[in-house]
Image (cartoon, rainbow, N blue to C red):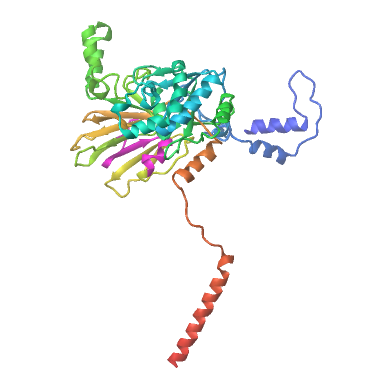
Amino acid sequence: MNPEDMQRAREMANGDASTPGSSPAPLRKALPISLLEKRTQFRRTRSLNAPSPFQHFGPCGRIMKNSAMVMQIQDPASQRLTWYKPPLTVLVIKKKDSQVLPPFVQLVEWLVQEKHMVVWVESAVLEDKLLRDDVKLEQESSKFQKVHAQYAGVRARFLHLREKLVTFKDGRDDLTDRIDFIVCLGGDGTLLYASQLFQQSVPPVMAFYLGSLGFLTPFQCDNFQEQVTNVLEGHAALTLRSRLRCSIHRKGERRKESLLHSVGGNLLIPGFHRQLNYVELNNGQTGKAGCNNNNGHNNSILVLNEVVINRGPSPYLSNIDIFLDGKYITSVQGDGLIVSTPTGSTAYAAAAGASMIHPSVPAILVTPICPHSLSFRPIVVPAGVELKISISPDSRNTSRVSFDGRNDQELNHGDSLRVTTSIYPVPSICSQDQISDWFDSLAEGLHWNVRKRQKCLDELSDLTASGSEDTLDEFDNLQIYDA
């Protein structure tokens, strides 16, 4: 609160404040100034950029208004889920494991019959042999025949619901603005797959733990009916997991832009347009390697964990130049580089020695992989900056780049990778809240700071006393022996 607001608050507390043309305000009991300042000083902030939403610094200092603001940082405690209309369509993503089939069928059956929702599943689910009754068992192994017989009841329930399900195929169908709610059954890979399906706005994701690690899946399937009902009623906290927007700019694109400016976009014949558009991501293979139709950027992809640049099968060190908002920062000589989100800081980056960052922290983590320098440590840069990563001109080899472990492709000399924070985060639904879920995952999934407890002094007092007496007796015996 600035001095003018403080003076006005004091006048209002003393009953002296009045507006021109109006009668004086009625007298009220004056509040102590210390109590008034205490109320205004310890008000909880709703912004991480300044002590209050009004970003004033002294009598004159202000933050200049910028229409191109990248993102607005909210108080994590205020991130609660709300529905402006009841959700009707739900996408259920399951792990490719036979043990997930019973809870998957039970969940789909409950959503269709009890909640009367439209359930979307991947088309590969309908092709699962364990959920089909037209499989030629005589051509299968004896082990498969035994497992197929064990899932007879589950298969019968699924076949009863089969005609009511809506299917999609990854890379062919566009799910933008079609899904209201996402349920993941499996491990952390299911959440990464859900993030890949939506390259723009992502519906709220509720992830159930049915995998091996479960760092991003806080829910248990024991009482899923109650938990899903609470979420559908809007009683849930959210963790907005930021994503990185990555785009590859090939060396030939510069020539493409120069020709467009020199000839003129309206004068180019269609065949010449097709020839220029051929030079895009993945060496001209449009629609592949992250070029989804619903992306909005022909050569960009959104990743939830990290983008990795490595030397691939080459025996030489990678030599990579890093630019931050157009300014040269440093060169990486080593096995490669990891650019990760706070969510990805507990994945590959943590294995490479980086710090673990809470998902609500707006940041980008840059971690070298086995650098050829003892002083090269991981760094954290602000969210919203643009990282440009390119192969050094004197590098002996090219590099490979992958996005969340997928779409591996080559970076040649003259190519560049642009990485920045996306405006489309992944709204992950919390089981408890942001803090409890994250630290529970650290303790249970990574065994963070797990060690044997040190005994207190009260338990060691007797041992310490006996040890000192033994030492004095031995010292006296040595003196007698010397005499």
Q: Residue at x 31, y 50 (%)?
A: 374
Q: Position of residue 16 (x, y in %)?
A: 77, 29
In percent of width and height, residue 441 lies at: 48, 41
Judge whether residue 303 can be spotted in this image.
Answer: yes
In the rendered image, the vertical position of residue 378 relative to residue 80, given as above or below: below
Quadrant of residue 406 within the rendered picture: top left
Q: Nearer the viewer, residue 447 or 105?
A: 105
Q: Nearer the viewer, residue 245 or 154?
A: 154
Residue 431: give x, y in percent of width and height. 54, 34
Q: Position of residue 421 (x, y in %)?
A: 41, 29
Residue furthest to the front in view is 138
Q: Please, is residue 66 above or below residue 467 in the view?
A: above
Residue plotted at (79% across, 25% down): 25
Q: In the rendered image, which quarter contains the N terminus? A: top right
In the image, is residue 422 above or below residue 454? above
Give the magenta part as a residue range.
322-350
The quarter in which the C terminus is drawn is bottom left
Which residue occupies the foreground of this view, 211 or 245?
A: 211
Q: Is residue 66 left or right of residue 263?
A: right
